């Protein structure tokens, strides 16, 4: 049996994701609306799983050379 809280997913706000990616909030909203960044709607705002942000960043890496 796992410990409480150990396997919980961390969710970030649009502003927190924007700060991490160093882009505007509007850019994050555009990524969500385009389907490039999965998000959960909570009331009138969105929450994005940390793992989804990590996957989005990893997909953006390109091999130089």
Image (tube, grey):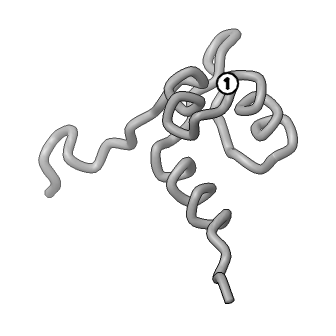
List x then y, in percent, for residue 54: 50, 55
Q: Which part of the image, by quadrant, shows the N terminus? A: bottom left
List x then y, in percent, for residue 59: 65, 66
7, above or below 64, in the image: above
Which residue sits furthest front? Answer: 65
Q: Look at 12% across and 47% down and name the residue there.
A: 3
Q: Nearer the viewer, residue 4 or 46?
A: 46
38, above or below 13, in the image: below
Give the secondary structure at mark 1.
strand
Q: Is residue 10 left or right of residue 19?
A: left
Quadrant in the rendering for residue 43 = top right
Q: Is residue 3 left or right of residue 50?
A: left
46, above or below 34, in the image: above
6, above or below 54, in the image: above
Tell me the crowding category of disc 1: few under 14, some 14 to 19, or many 20 or more residues within 10 angstroms, Cα based: few
List x then y, in percent, for residue 49: 51, 41
Q: Nearer the viewer, residue 29 or 3?
A: 29
Q: Which part of the image, by quadrant, shows the C terminus? A: bottom right
Residue that label 1 marks: 41
Q: Look at 71% across and 32% down and name the residue there.
A: 28
Q: Look at 20% across and 46% down and name the residue there.
A: 6
List x then y, in percent, for residue 36: 77, 50
Which residue sits furthest top? Answer: 44
Q: Is residue 56 left or right of residue 54?
A: right
Which residue sits furthest right? Answer: 34
Number of numbered tags placed on the structure image = 1
């Amino acid at each position: 049996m796992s410990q409480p809280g150990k396997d919980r997913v961390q969710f970030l706000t649009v502003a927190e994701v924007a700060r991490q990616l160093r882009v505007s909030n509007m850019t994050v909203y555009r990524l969500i609306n385009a389907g490039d960044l999965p998000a959960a709607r909570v009331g009138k705002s969105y929450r994005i799983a940390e793992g989804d942000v990590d996957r989005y960043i990893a997909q953006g890496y390109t091999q130089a050379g």
